[in-house]
Amino acid sequence: MKSRLLCSVIFYVSAAMSVGAANAGASDFEERRARGLAVFSSLTGQADVSQLAAQFEAENGALGSFALDFVMGDIWSRPGLSKRDRNLIVLTLLATLHQTNQLSYYVPGGLNHGLSATEIREIMTHIAAYAGFPRALDAMAETNRILSKLGHAPEGGKLAAAEKFSNAQRRERGVAVMAKLSGNPSSNPEEVITAMAGSLGPLGAYGIDFAFGEVWARSQLSRRDRSLLVVSVLTALGRTKELHIHVPAAIRHGVTKVELEELMLTAFAYAGAPLAVEGMHVVQALE
């Protein structure tokens, strides 16, 4: 009798716990979905995205559910990074991975989240130095198409060409960028060059003069933004050795460790877990 009573008590307690867990799970899901829809709304600029989200989920099934609930409801809704910066990171990851079809969501989202059309175009320009010109040009073409459709076509139909600098000016600008990036404030340019690029031959010289002296030194993005961008590119490409240079550089440019952790969580959703894990190891190694 006692045994049956004990079994009954255990059964009802277990059932109650199961119901409670199910209710808690449902509540958790509803919160994630609500957060996801809020992000989806800010990306698209539409106040009511319920119908659009339902269509997205119907077309993509469980994948669509995860995109709404995990990517937007969990990752995008975290407080450690502004939506502007997360959008910058996502645009960088998509261009680096040559996923230009996804830019139709994130170029408008960039505008809605506080990036200017100039800054969005500059993301594509900077990518050329780290992921190559073909990917950057393809991403720029799609970006221009979207921005023009949204009323941000270049004035007169033409974007401004790059400023023209002498070789001496490029080198001077490049060394100044490298000094900040490396934490080596040496006033002797040759010492900076030797420390960072002395063993790379002509590649080192072009890196200083073009990547640093022309691209990094441009005013269309802050150095902090460019560090977020470069760490994102290197993460997407799995360039862990280079991350050991640019993650500390990002700290010197004003990016926090928490923001770098958020960058890697974003990369988890957009570039995959293995690449994000490698990047996170570098971030966690910061003192």
Image (tube, grey):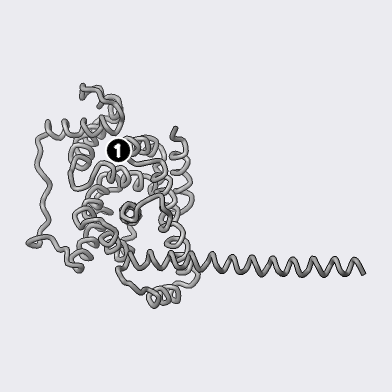
Q: Residue at x 26, y 25 (%)?
A: 185
Query: Which residue is at the front of the view, 242 or 114?
Result: 114
Q: Quadrant of the C terminus?
A: top left
Q: Residue at x 40, y 75 (%)?
A: 50
Residue 60 % position (x, y): 45, 72
| Left/right of residue 108 with respect to residue 167 in the rendered view | right
Residue 276 % position (x, y): 45, 48
The local crowd at label 1, few if under 14, some if 14 to 19, many if 20 or more residues have their Cα within 10 Å, is some
Q: Residue at x 58, y 66 (%)?
A: 25
State which quadrant residue 165 falls in. Answer: top left
Q: Is residue 271 above or below residue 27?
A: above
Q: Quadrant of the N terminus?
A: bottom right
Query: To which residue does mark 1 refer?
Result: 253
Q: Is residue 11 above or below residue 84?
A: below
Query: Which residue is at the front of the view, 274 or 69?
Result: 69
Q: Callout 1, which amino acid?
A: His
State which quadrant residue 260 falls in. Answer: top left
Query: Which residue is at the front of the view, 263 or 213?
Result: 263
| Left/right of residue 151 with respect to residue 240 in the rendered view | left
Q: In the rendered picture of this protein, how many numbered marks are placed on residues?
A: 1
Query: Which residue is at the front of the view, 159 or 31?
Result: 31
The residue tagged with tag 1: helix, strand or loop?
loop
| Left/right of residue 43 with respect to residue 161 in the rendered view | right
Q: Residue at x 10, y 44 (%)?
A: 163
Residue 194 % position (x, y): 27, 24
